[in-house]
């Protein structure tokens, strides 16, 4: 997969999506927004990719939305009719939201490996991942408040469901202050903090390897059930998983797992 702002590779059933604008601190320009959706929609359809690691090249994970992109919005939405101009801006925002939703929409688990700065749009991005891990030098900031705007592509909707404290979410959103790695771990934003970037990569890859060895069909179903349960009642979630297993339970993956020798790891098709 050849993309201008991302490096995408697959090895041993693990796909790596690397933000690849290191000279710009991986600032998310218009091309990167489109590339992200192409990458995750594309990997969703590639059976050999069973799990995805999202990381950044260079000193930082991402500096967030490229300000040059923000400055370029006005010419894109220009129209003598104020209503049509506002409608165009709304459609741009919805399209950007859909880019990040592509991480959730992708059936494969997405593990974000974060080092250095993760600010602004970077928070929106990682909140759409399944799990987040970081190195000790990582820090997080909802920077939109400092440029006079409301974060509008996912942070304010997803972050409260990740860290569980409305007070902390509001403090971060209202102040734009930095949350360091230790606080991110304590709040539940990240699963684990690694000493440095090398340890982060190794640790996240080990977790990804464990996931990649499981039944791909079961992993995909588990992700769908967890996403569905997050946004629905317990009764709705139970009904949905009953329907899923009525259709998918009697798979060859179940047979292989049941028939595997004691202590032997079953091998599954993509």
Image: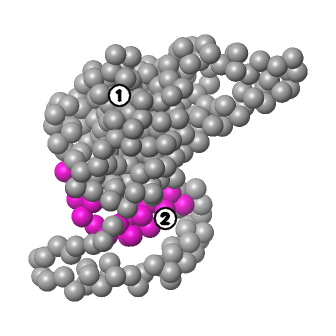
Viewer-side residue, 227 vs 79: 79
Kindly indicate the quadrant of the structure image that contains residue 135: top left
Comparing marks 2 and 1, which lies closer to the viewer?
A: 1
SS under mark 2: helix
Rendered location of residue 204, percent (x, y): 24, 45
In the image, which residues are magenta? 206-228
Which badge, 2 or 1, is on the more N-terminal residue? Answer: 1
| Distance from Cα at disc 2 to Cα at disc 1 | 32 Å
Indicate the quadrant containing the N terminus: top left, top right, bottom left or bottom right: top left
Main SS of the magenta segment? helix
Q: Is residue 215 magenta?
A: yes
Instruction: Say which residue label 2 marks.
Output: 225
Query: Which corner quadrant of the image does residue 162 belong to?
Result: top left
Relative height, residue 121 to residue 71 (above, below): below
193 falls in the magenta region = no
Q: Which of the numbered marks, if any, corresponds to residue 20?
A: 1
């Amino acid at each position: 997969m050849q993309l201008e702002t991302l490096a995408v590779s697959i090895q041993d059933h693990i796909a790596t999506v690397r933000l690849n604008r290191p000279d710009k601190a991986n600032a998310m320009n218009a091309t990167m927004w489109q590339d992200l959706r192409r990458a995750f929609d594309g990997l969703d359809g590639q059976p050999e990719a069973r799990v995805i690691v999202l990381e950044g090249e260079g000193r930082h994970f991402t500096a967030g939305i490229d300000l040059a992109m923000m400055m370029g919005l006005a010419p894109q939405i220009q129209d003598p009719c104020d209503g049509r101009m506002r409608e165009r801006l709304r459609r741009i925002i919805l399209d950007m939201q859909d880019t990040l939703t592509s991480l959730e929409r992708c059936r494969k688990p997405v593990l974000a490996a974060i080092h250095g700065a993760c600010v602004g749009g970077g928070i929106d991005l990682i909140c759409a991942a399944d799990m987040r891990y970081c190195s000790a030098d990582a820090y997080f900031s909802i920077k939109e408040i400092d440029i006079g705007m409301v974060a509008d592509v996912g942070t304010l909707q997803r972050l409260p469901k990740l860290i569980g404290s409305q007070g902390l979410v509001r403090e971060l959103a209202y102040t734009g202050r930095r949350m360091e790695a230790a606080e991110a771990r304590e709040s539940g934003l990240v699963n684990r903090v690694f000493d440095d970037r090398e340890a982060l990569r190794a640790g996240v890859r080990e977790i990804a390897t464990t996931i990649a060895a499981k039944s791909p069909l079961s992993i995909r179903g588990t992700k769908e059930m967890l996403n569905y349960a997050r946004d629905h009642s317990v009764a709705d979630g139970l009904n949905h998983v009953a329907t899923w297993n009525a259709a998918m339970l009697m798979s060859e993956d179940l047979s292989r797992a049941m028939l595997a020798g004691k202590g032997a790891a079953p091998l599954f098709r993509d």
